[in-house]
Image (cartoon, grey):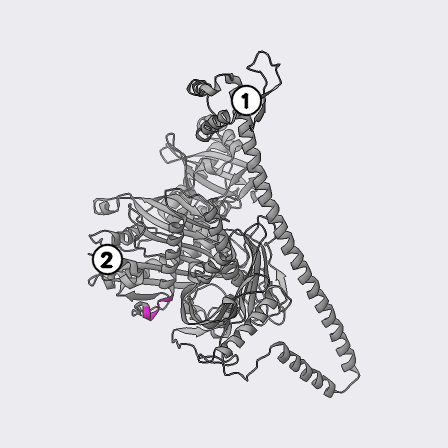
Amino acid sequence: MMMVHTMNRESPDKGLDSGKYVRYTPEQVEALERVYTECPKPSSLRRQQLIRECPILSNIEPKQIKVWFQNRRCREKQRKEAARLQTVNRKLNAMNKLLMEENDRLQKQVSHLVYENGHMKQQLHTSSGTTTDNSCESVVVSGQQHQQQNPNPQHLQRDANNPAGLLSIAEEALAEFLSKATGTAVDWVQMIGMKPGPDSIGIVAISRNCSGIAARACGLVSLEPMKVAEILKDRPSWLRDCRCVDTLSVIPAGNGGTIELIYTQMYAPTTLAAARDFWTLRYSTCLEDGSYVVCERSITSATGGPTGPPSSSFVRAEMRPSGFLIRPCEGGGSILHIVDHVDLDAWSVPEVMRPLYESSKILAQKMTVAALRHVRQIAQETSGEVQYGGGRQPAVLRTFSQRLCRGFNDAVNGFVDDGWSPMGSDGAEDITVMINLSPGKLCGSQYGNSFLPSFGSGVLCAKASMLLQNVPPAVLVRFLREHRSEWADYGVDAYAAASLRASPFAVPCARAGGFPSNQVILPLAQTVEHEESLEVVRLEGHAYSPEDMGLARDMYLLQLCSGVDENVVGGCAQLVFAPIDESFADDAPLLPSGFRIIPLEQKSTPNGASTNRTLDLASALEGSTRQAGEADPNGCNFRSVLTIAFQFTFDNHSRDSVASMARQYVRSIVGSIQRVALAIAPRPGSNISPISVPTSPEALTLVRWIARSYSLHTGADLFGSDSQTSGDTLLHQLWNHTDAILCCSLKTNASPVFTFANQTGLDMLETTLVALQDIMLDKTLDEPGRKALCSEFPKIMQQGYAHLPAGVCASSMGRMVSYEQATVWKVLEDDESNHCLAFMFVNWSFV
């Protein structure tokens, strides 16, 4: 009979000494295990009940039952920990193997470079003592070597009717792809910020001195090879810039492989350049070592093969041999190698935009790393490691993200075959307006004709692109997300939300500042590495007059935010949102609008100076350039391109009104972003015009109160002995004061919020005058600062002012700010009643 042993601290048998082992019968163990499955940690009452219900346990004391459960929980914990350590060990072994292979490849690359260096030195030494004929001969030899490295046999008739010719192209593509994935065909350099490790995304490298642009990634994924291949072949599911993939022909090949002729269309990321398409051959096969490989290359006149489908709206790009190699990993999972190598025909886009099409870093983030992240995301969802709230499946939430991106890309590109057509301009060319009279097709076939059933006969899109200088994309998108009231008009939001209701809403006039509204962000899901988040935004409605009662209801937006990590090199930042109703059905129609900011790599001119193209709307690109070779005197030359697109529904009677509102709205957003750009990134050399000094009568009165109260309470002059008393002069002196001066509300029943600040105060809080009113005082001061203010508050109210010691506070973007001293005083109105509190932070700086 099998006997189970456990340590007994207090033996139930009086004949047994304490510390002896108690022997449990299989029946007793089975009874205890049943209870453990239901309740691993039973209470004292539950253990006593167990003994009463199970006569076979009657000879065991309750205390001994408690010891059994303790031991059982300990064994379970040890088992789980052992399994976890085994998994980590497998990952480490696989990663070690990957790193050793990468080390071998790098050693080969070093040897190759050393050989080339020696050969070049020899050629230079030889050419110095010979005639130019030898150098010409060297050029011929070099050209022959180049031809040998890039064989292009023409003896086979490579067309759709000759599978042998296509197989020849496929085998060449396979050999070239493998030489890039695991060999030294491309001079790879590790991408900054991508360090390998068991929990990292993997090893990411980009090309250097390569024809076209290329990126490579390799990492571990806990999925079987064929499942990985199935996921990656479905390019539209993970590549957000992919519009469609059409497989026009499938030809069986050896080893159970296939050859496919594929036509792919890609969205243009901005309104400033045409979209790209590819005509490629894709070859899938198994290698002798059990690995599975899928490689792809363009079919061109040089390679032979059939001619691809023509397209007037696209520029034909070339895919050099690319693909993915999937190797089975011992103990389960796969080792994945991905290579992307393309030539996007950068010469066909405006010069200022070419860095976007010549950057291997951007290619790595948008394609290579995105593919690896997507596979890892699905692997963790499959294993149950990722849990999302709200009762929705991860696949459903992922579909929402894809639909938001796709809808935004459709709006930015405005393809004719999607039903888009341009609308006449209002005389200015800064905003492009397009209309679409087939919204059912625009929003997806799953909606049929049910979208906008009783309202709206079409969709209108207003869009623009602009160049930003010295504004990090991640910081700007974070600001746009967290301070919606800075740029959004609540009335326009209400009009967009009306498309989800049966009754139309009056077309608003976009007002400067619009209606302020509070937003509440409710997170739905995040990707594994938090590079993208899906959330619901509730906009709380307010009515300010009887005619605005239609606005006094909450509205909801489904919002996708990505690229907010400032440390990601070459990353695109995006904020896309669409109105939804309270039901938030899985098949809810979406009409996305939003912002996309893509960094442009700094390019140097031949003489070493950087070209500096200033920010302006797309229409002013040609006229807003600095002369080539003119260096930025401040050394700042970080540029990015911002694309804005907003979509609205309209009916036959409101089309012109909606178009006028949309143009005015997008123009107001452009102006807001230019002001925000200066506020959140006050870099030297920025060409944005500075924020104008507020000159309203209210501002002049407030400044007079601030200066008079300071002098009254402290006995000193706020601006020194040479200050002037006129309103305009006082305002300019306060606005340009070197210390940060801020005013906050003086409330006893609510948290004080800031109401006014000078330029230095706005810089310190990294905000603007409008967004300032969303910032609360207690969220800005740290704990010691709040305690110091509370202790001095009675003195402030009685004496009129107080000095706070040096401390630390936080800007609206979360950055820490240190200051040497803060002076707080009570601002009095003309009738001596309390108006607000004023703060002056002396000698502040970012930590």
**Please, is residue 24 above or below residue 361 in the view?**
above
Q: Residue tagged by mark 1? A: 67
The answer to whether 580 is drawn above or below residue 145 in the figure is: above
- Of residue 557 and residue 388, the one placed in the foreground of this image is 388
Please indicate whether residue 192 sits to the left or right of residue 725 in the image: right
Disc 2: which residue: 450
Give the residue at the far right of this rendering: 129
- Magenta segment's dominant SS is helix
Q: Earlier in the sequence, mark 1 or mark 2?
A: 1
Q: Is residue 79 above or below residue 683?
A: above
CA separation, marks 1 and 2?
64 Å
If the image is split into quadrants, where does the C terminus sit? top right
Q: Is residue 771 magenta?
A: no
Residue for point 46% across, 46% down: 758
Q: Amino acid at mark 2?
A: Ser
- The residue drawn where x is 78% and y is 81% is 126
User: Where does residue 773 sit, x and y in percent of width and height?
Assistant: 40, 43
362 on left or right of 648: right
Tell me the element at label 2: loop
Question: Depth-wise, is mark 1 or mark 2 nearer the camera?
Answer: 1
Q: Amino acid at mark 1?
A: Val
Residue 26 in picture, x, y percent from top left: 51, 27
Q: Nearer the viewer, residue 577 or 220?
A: 220
The magenta stretch is: 413-417
